[in-house]
Image (spheres, rainbow, N blue to C red):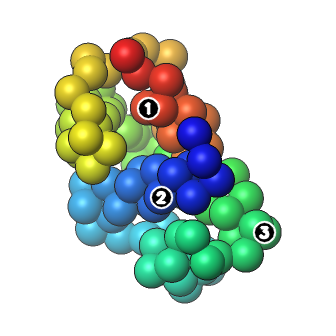
């Protein structure tokens, strides 16, 4: 997988989170996330890393979320954006960060 493909896949995860939750994280990180989503290939490496380190829970106000249904919906949205149709694996939750979820999605076979 090329560097550009990885950057675009990170955008897919961030776009899916935006679609599922209606937000780009909280006020502090939102401008950086929006900027990354607008130009993932041209974004500085530090922004790629910053967005990847954000945990999923930052998009959900309730600490018990995302629940099973929300994870399933998020997974389906990510798969659609990546052009895949793979069942949702276990082992991830609100403490999972964007880069971990991206890696899980990229490895889905």
Q: Residues within 10 Å of mark 1 (few under 14, many from 20)?
A: many
Q: Nearer the viewer, mark 1 or mark 2?
A: 2
Name the secondary structure under disc 2.
helix
Name the secondary structure under disc 1.
helix
Q: Nearer the viewer, residue 80 or 61?
A: 80
Residue 88 visible in the shown view: yes
Which residue position holds label 1? 105
Q: Nearer the viewer, residue 13 or 1?
A: 1
Name the secondary structure under disc 3.
helix
Look at the numbered discs 1 and 2 and tell me whether their residues touch, using CB distance below 8 Å. no
Q: Give coordinates of residue 68: x percent, y percent.
A: 29, 26
Which residue position holds label 3? 46
Which residue position holds label 2? 8
Whichever of labels 1 and 2 marks the residue nearer the N terminus, that label is 2
Q: Check residue 79 in the rendering and tell me which mark sits there, or answer none.
A: none
Name the quadrant containing residue 76.
Answer: top left
Q: Nearer the viewer, mark 2 or mark 3?
A: 2
Whichever of labels 2 and 3 marks the residue nearer the N terminus, that label is 2
Whichever of labels 1 and 3 marks the residue nearer the N terminus, that label is 3
Q: Which quarter shows the N terminus?
A: top right
Residue 74 visible in the shown view: no
Q: Give coordinates of residue 109: x percent, y percent.
A: 37, 16
**Does residue 3 appear to the left or right of 30 in the view shown?**
right
**Does residue 46 appear to the left or right of 79 in the view shown?**
right
Look at 48% across and 67% down and name the residue there: 25
Position above or below: 68 against 70:
above
């Amino acid at each position: 997988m090329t560097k550009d493909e990885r950057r675009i896949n990170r955008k897919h995860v961030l776009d899916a989170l935006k679609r599922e939750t209606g937000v780009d994280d909280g006020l502090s990180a939102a401008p950086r996330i929006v900027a990354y989503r607008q130009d993932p290939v041209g974004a500085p490496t530090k922004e790629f890393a910053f967005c990847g380190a954000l945990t999923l829970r930052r998009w959900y106000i309730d600490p018990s979320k995302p629940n099973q249904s929300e994870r399933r919906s998020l997974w389906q949205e990510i798969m659609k954006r990546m052009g895949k149709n793979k069942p949702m694996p276990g082992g991830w939750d609100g403490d999972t960060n964007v880069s971990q979820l991206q890696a899980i999605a990229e490895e889905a076979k």
